[in-house]
Structures are given as C-alpha cells and as structure tokens.
Image (cartoon, grey):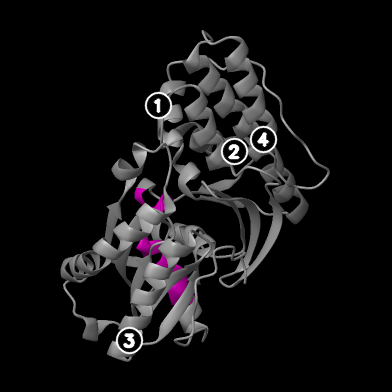
Amino acid sequence: MKDIITLGIESSCDETSVAVVKNGREILSNVINSQIKIHEQYGGVVPEIASRNHVEAISEVTKEALKQANITFDDIDHIACTYGPGLVGALLVGVSYAKALSYTLGKPLVATNHIEGHIAANYITHKDLEPPFLCLIISGGHTHLVHIKNYKEFEILGKTRDDAIGEAFDKVARVVGLGYPGGPKIDKLAKEGEANIQLPKTHFENLDFSFSGIKTAIINLHHKNPDVNKADLCASFEKTVTEVLLENTLKAAKELNINKIALAGGVSANSYIREKFLELEKTHNMKIYYPEPILCTDNAAMIACAGYYNFINGKTSDLYLNAIPNLKLGE
C-alpha cells in the first residue's frame, strides 16, 4: 500500500507551522515559528501583528519543513490547512498559501478544523489509540468535552459558557503580575505554593463549564489583599479548575461507559492537570492519553494528521475555500 504524505499548514493564531506527516501518524518534520516573544510586550496576541509575521515566515517555514523531511513538493499527496477557528487574518495567510500551492502543484486541498487537529495530536503520540474515546480539549480558545465516535464523527458533550480555561489562566496570570503567556508561568509558580485558598466552582446540570466566576474571585481577592501569596493563589486556582475538569469528565465517562480519556490543547501540557488525570488510571481504571508537549500547542503536524483522515474519507476542498474564524467542531 502506497504511503500518503501530507503537508500540513497551521496559522490560526501566533504560530506559523508547516509539517510533513506520513500516513497520518508519522512525523517527518514539524517546523514551528513562534511569535511569543513578539506578543509578550503587549500582554497578549495582537491580531494584525500576528498576520504580518505569518506572511513573512510562511515560505521559509515551508522550505525548512520540506528540507527536514528530505522530500520535495512532488512527493506530497495533498495539502491540509487550518481554515478555522482562529484569528481571521492569521487564518487567511495559511489558507491563501495552501490554495496557491494546491493550484500550482495540482495537489488536493484539504480544509482542516483546528479543534480536530488538537484531538488528532493524540494519534501521533499514541499510535495504538483508536476511537471511540472521550477527549477533553483545553486551550486558550476552547474548553470542550467531546465524545470521539470515530475519526470524523464527534459529539460535544459539554463546553464553556464563558471563558475558555486557557483564557482564564492568562487573565489570572495578568492579575498577579506574571505576564503572558500565563499558562506555563502559573504552572511553574504553583509548584512553590499550597492550594490553601478557597475558590468558587461553577456546576451545571449538564456537562458545561464556566471559569468566569473563579477568575472574578481571584481579581477581587487580589485587589482586596495585594500581598496575598501568589504561589498559593496559583496553586489554589490550578487545583480548583482541575477538580471541575475531572468531575465533568468522570461524569461523562460513567454515562457513556468509556474508560479511554484523551487530553488535548495547550492547557493539557499543564503538569498538575496531567498528574491528576493520570491518577484516574489507578483510582478509576481509566486509560489516559495526552500528546507530547510540543504537540499540545498549535502545530502543523496535528493539522496534517486530522487532514489525513479527511483525505482518506474523501473530504477535499476547492479553491473557493475561505477562513471561518468561528468554525465549530464537526463543521
């Protein structure tokens, strides 16, 4: 059986990434040009600056990805690109570049959902992982609890009603003076503290999430007591939000009688969250999966993997493909 080579392109936010992946699960290259240093000085991603830097970087990143994979454009079978969700200007850079390559090379174009890419990152790290399973997608823009029925069929069981969990991490980090990006900095500081501060948890009858209450509680607490121990505050924040994630995930697993749980998205790189979910393997006889750290953040290998499953299922796009910044999972 002939190998299928996918060129993946990711530009949904502030990483310009191009990857070459074989048969959906074997990375031949995964080049990531990050703009974190650029956006740090602004305390968050500035969309127009992100778009401009994608334009400047994408050609060189593509050349480097081909070089590291030791292939040429002729060896590629199809081109997968993120077309949503994300920042519209940033998305358009990747989509336009992918369409130009598709037209010039005569290669099929495969539109790929960024959220599906985060799920698919697990397939690269865990070659034995097959649906069905539960996936908790926790990132700067999303908090989704999803039933992965097969490679292309998803059912959203719960999602955030306000802030995504990664957004809450960034806002809390800003309040306590840690800066951007907040997730890794809170993770590091929390290790020096104790989770000894009582913070609110929001519960619903269904499996939805809410993180605006805990964010507001921390803002108010910090304003009233600026000398509060920041390490303790970070540790308490991590503990509280992780408990919410665990409670909803376990409830879904019980309802669906599923014992395979995957984590995905940038926040899944958090060491405390991983530790607590791994404990489920012993306490609840669960099997826990999560991508290696480089595949948790935005990258093109995960897009190539998700695009591969689109491609083998006959889902290709024409050159009228456009960016959809508010694209939903499964669309």
Residue under label 3: 2
Which residues make up the magenta segment? 294-309
Mark-to-mark CA distance, 3 and 1: 45 Å
Q: Position of residue 29 (x, y in %)?
A: 25, 64
Pointer 3 local density, CA inside 10 Å: few below 14, some 14–19, many at least 20: few
Q: Which mark is residue 280?
A: 2
Looking at the picture, does residue 26 appear above or below residue 232?
below
Pointer 1 local density, CA inside 10 Å: few below 14, some 14–19, many at least 20: some
Q: Nearer the viewer, residue 297 or 16?
A: 16
Q: Position of residue 171 (x, y in %)?
A: 53, 33
What is the residue that sits farthest to the bottom in this orientation?
106
Tag nearer the camera, 4 or 3: 4
Q: Is residue 274 visible?
A: yes
Kind of residue sitting beneath label 2 = Leu
Residue under label 4: 212
Kind of residue sitting beneath label 4 = Ser
Please tell me which of labels 2 and 3 falls first in the chain: 3
**Corner quadrant of residue 197:** top right
Kind of residue sitting beneath label 3 = Lys
Looking at the picture, does residue 257 appear above or below residue 18?
above
Instruction: Characterize the magenta stretch by its predominant secondary structure.
Output: helix
| Residues marked 2 and 1 touching at CB (< 8 Å) | no
Q: Answer with left or right where residue 63 lies relative to residue 189.
A: left
Q: Answer with left or right where residue 117 lies relative to residue 208.
A: left
Screen quadrant of the C terminus:
bottom right
Please tell me which of labels 2 and 1 falls first in the chain: 1
Q: Is residue 304 visible?
A: no
| Residues marked 4 and 3 touching at CB (< 8 Å) | no
Residue under label 1: 188
